[in-house]
Amino acid sequence: MVQVPAGHAHEAHEAHEAQAILIVEDDAEVRDMLKLLLDSRGYRTFAASDGVQALAIAAEHGVSLDLIVADYNLPGSNGLEIAGKIEDASARKIPVIMLTGDISAATLLEIANKGHVHLYKPADARTLVHHIAGMLAANRRETGAPTVFIADDDQEIREAMRDMLEMHGYRTEIFASGSSFWDAYSPGWRGVCLSMRECPALGGLS
């Protein structure tokens, strides 16, 4: 289960809209709650019930996956094995949060040695979201990966541009306006910004 405090299930945060998270959880109720929580925070989520589905999603979207939230006890391969296979296929390090019930000290050590974050079930929603935000920020600083920032007030256009660029291997982040991009901007960001010249509030030329 995921413990979601009242009033927090529908807080949207568009700044995270393009950051993609893969959820791997065989319990349908928990999986749906995780997806609802992370969707409400503005993340772009993909959900799988087992390793087969997870690897199929990674094969299609691996280049754009920013983080994995996985249950350890899954049918077939466990969460650690699945995360490792996805990282190998993507040829890059992907931050991982491993959710578990009661497990052995040896398994806890294995999770720690992989550099993954471990949380016991039921995971508190605030704690989970806090870890996700921190891990994504740290990963961006470490990789310094160039990103295409898309600022456009037309949701259909910006999402179409995002999908096209990610199909060609680019990392993207999308914003509903030039001002929302500027509010989120940090001097350490590397990449290129694509913006409508006449975007509301703050146009592309500005």
Image (cartoon, rainbow, N blue to C red):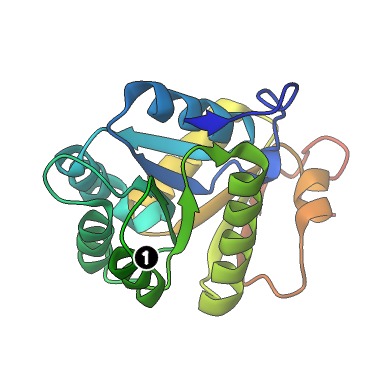
* Left or right placement of residue 122 versus residue 59 in this view: right
Residue at (76% x, 60% y) in the render: 185
- Relative image position of residue 6 (x, y in whole percent): 73, 22
143 is higher (above) or lower (below) than 46? below
Report x, y in % for residue 69: 42, 48
Amino acid on which disc 1 is placed = Leu
In this view, 98 is above or below 24: below
Q: Residue at x 47, y 48 (%)?
A: 120
Q: Residue at x 54, y 45 (%)?
A: 18
Disc 1 marks which residue? 108
Instruction: Identify which residue, 166 or 37, lies in the foreground.
Output: 37
Residue positioned most to the right: 201
Image quadrant in which you'd find residue 91: bottom left
Q: Residue furthest left?
A: 76
Q: Indicate the position of residue 2 as horizontal and vertical percent values.
A: 52, 32
- The residue nearer to you, when weighing 198 against 193, is 193
Q: Is residue 17 left or right of residue 52?
A: right
Element under disc 1? helix
Residue 147 higher or lower than 70, as above or below: below
Does residue 62 appear left or right of residue 191 in this picture? left
The answer to whether any part of residue 157 appears in the image is no
Q: Name the one closer to the observer, 123 or 95.
A: 123
